[in-house]
Structure formats: structure tokens, C-alpha cells
């Protein structure tokens, strides 16, 4: 659809045209990149109940939020999209509230139903392991100081073995934590909250500048495949592959 025609429909109040045009301004596709215009178009469509626009507006506000000024509005739009059945919005809220629950476990009941205690605790354990692994900078002789062994190669192997075990365990904890969290809420609410590989990538630090993860303009087939594959299955598959390779 030509830009001129989209502009005409958007000015007439067509919510879907406003959403599509907002995506183009956000990506700089056929128009000059302009986040403010994208936000205005998304907001117009979102106020008319356009679910994808509600999600896109919440995500864009979060990504542009450097000082925490727009976080409340962003979550408000994500909440509306989630309540209207948008699975990506549900997953994003799940991730946001999981981080809150990790820092303040007493808030788990308050933010229900977007996170549960089992999933939060599993993610907390995973984060501890990840921090431990990223912070390891160890010299073999210093780490094993005081231990009087004769075989230096054996000591190095033992350390590698421990690190390998920790890394493999982190994938297992991540996969089972997400899965059992989903099962918990399915049994409780009768709703399966999906978490895909795309959702996981969207919530990794530093990925906010990759517009493709939220609004793909190319390689859409790949995006659809990654959005279809469950994040829990991905972690458990990596865990099994690493376990098999270790044997």
C-alpha cells in the first residue's frame, strides 16, 4: 500500500493504517525515521482498541525510556494488549514482573497473574549461576593455592568440569523454571502463557536497538519460526545436547 494512501486512511482515523504507518516511521521504511510520529500513530490506533498497536506502543515507549519517565504508560499499554490476548505482551509483562519478583519476592502475589513464585525463584537461581560464571576470572595456581596436588593437569580438568556442570545446570534450571511456571498458571487459570525464543531475545539486555525483534520487516519467516519455538524447549534442548556431548 502506497504511503500517500496510508496517510489518507490514517488521517481519516483508520486504526490499522495508523498502526502500519507507525511501524514505517519507527523503522524508517519509505519515510524518515521519526519515533515521535510513530508513537503518535500507535497511540491513536491503540486508543481505538488496536491490539498490535497497544503492544507496539508499549514496547517502543520502554525502549526509548532512558530516565524511567514513560515506564508506567508503557506497562499500561502492554497490560491492555495482554488483557486483549496479545501473547507477546503477556510474555513481556511476565519478564518485567519476574525481574521485580527476583528483587522483591514479597511482591509475587501482588503482580499475579503475570508471574508466579516457582518461576521467579527458578529465574533467580539461573541469574545467580550466570553472574557467578560471568564473574569468574581465576588463575589456576591462585585458585588452588594451599592444595598440595602433584598433577597440575588434573586440577585444571577439575575446574573445567565444575564450570561445565554449572553452565549445563543453568540451562536445565531455566528450561524447567519457565515450563513449570507455565504449567502452574495453566492449572490455576486455564490459560497457557506462551514464551518463545523471540520473547527471550526481546528481553535480553542491549537488544532494544534491534527493531527486527519487535517489528520484522524482512526475514519474517525466520521470525515466525523463532516466535513459534518455545523458550523452555530451547533451553532444555541445549541442556540435552551439552549433556550428550559431555558424555
Image: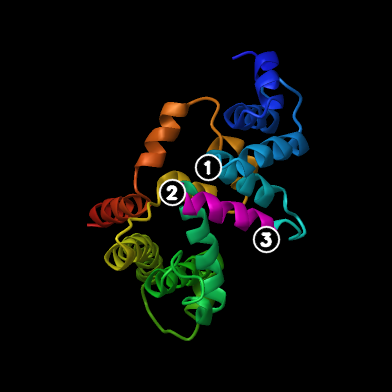
Q: Mark 2 points at which residue?
A: 85
The foreground one among 231 and 92 is 92
Q: Vertically, is 21 above or below 39?
A: above
Q: Can residue 199 be seen in this view?
A: yes
State the separation of the CA atoms marked 1 and 2.
8 Å
**Residue under numbered circle 3:** 72
**Residue under label 1:** 51
Residue 56 in picture, x, y percent from top left: 59, 42
Residue 106 image point, x, y percent: 51, 82
29 left or right of 98 in image: right
Mark 1 touches mark 2? (CB < 8 Å): yes
**In which quadrant of the rendered view does residue 189 lie?**
bottom left
Q: To which quarter of the image does residue 73 belong?
A: bottom right
Residue drawn at 65 percent across, 54 percent down: 74
Q: Write the start and end of the magenta stretch as one range.
A: 71-87
Q: Where is residue 42 in the image (x, y as percent from the top left)?
A: 65, 38
Amino acid at each position: 500500500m502506497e504511503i500517500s494512501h496510508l496517510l489518507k486512511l490514517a488521517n481519516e482515523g483508520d486504526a490499522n493504517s495508523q498502526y502500519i504507518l507507525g511501524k514505517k516511521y519507527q523503522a524508517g521504511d519509505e519515510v524518515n525515521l521519526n519515533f515521535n510520529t510513530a508513537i503518535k500513530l500507535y497511540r491513536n490506533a491503540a486508543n481505538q482498541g488496536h491490539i498490535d498497536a497497544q503492544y507496539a506502543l508499549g514496547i517502543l515507549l520502554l525502549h526509548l525510556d532512558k530516565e524511567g519517565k514513560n515506564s508506567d504508560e508503557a506497562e499500561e499499554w502492554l497490560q491492555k494488549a495482554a488483557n486483549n490476548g496479545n501473547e507477546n505482551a503477556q510474555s513481556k509483562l511476565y519478564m518485567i514482573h519476574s525481574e521485580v519478583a527476583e528483587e522483591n519476592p514479597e511482591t509475587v502475589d501482588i503482580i499475579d497473574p503475570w508471574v508466579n513464585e516457582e518461576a521467579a525463584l527458578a529465574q533467580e537461581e539461573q541469574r545467580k549461576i550466570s553472574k557467578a560464571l560471568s564473574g569468574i576470572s581465576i588463575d589456576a595456581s591462585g585458585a588452588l593455592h594451599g592444595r598440595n596436588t602433584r598433577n597440575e593437569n588434573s586440577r585444571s580438568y577439575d575446574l573445567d568440569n565444575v564450570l561445565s556442570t554449572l553452565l549445563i545446570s543453568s540451562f536445565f534450571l531455566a528450561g524447567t523454571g519457565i515450563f513449570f511456571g507455565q504449567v502452574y498458571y495453566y492449572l490455576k487459570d486455564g490459560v497457557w502463557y506462551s514464551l518463545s525464543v523471540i520473547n527471550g531475545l526481546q528481553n535480553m539486555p542491549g537488544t532494544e536497538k534491534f527493531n527486527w525483534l519487535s517489528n520484522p520487516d524482512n526475514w519474517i519467516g525466520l521470525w515466525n519460526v523463532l516466535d513459534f519455538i518455545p523458550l523452555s524447549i530451547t533451553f532444555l534442548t541445549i541442556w540435552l545436547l551439552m549433556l550428550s556431548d559431555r558424555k
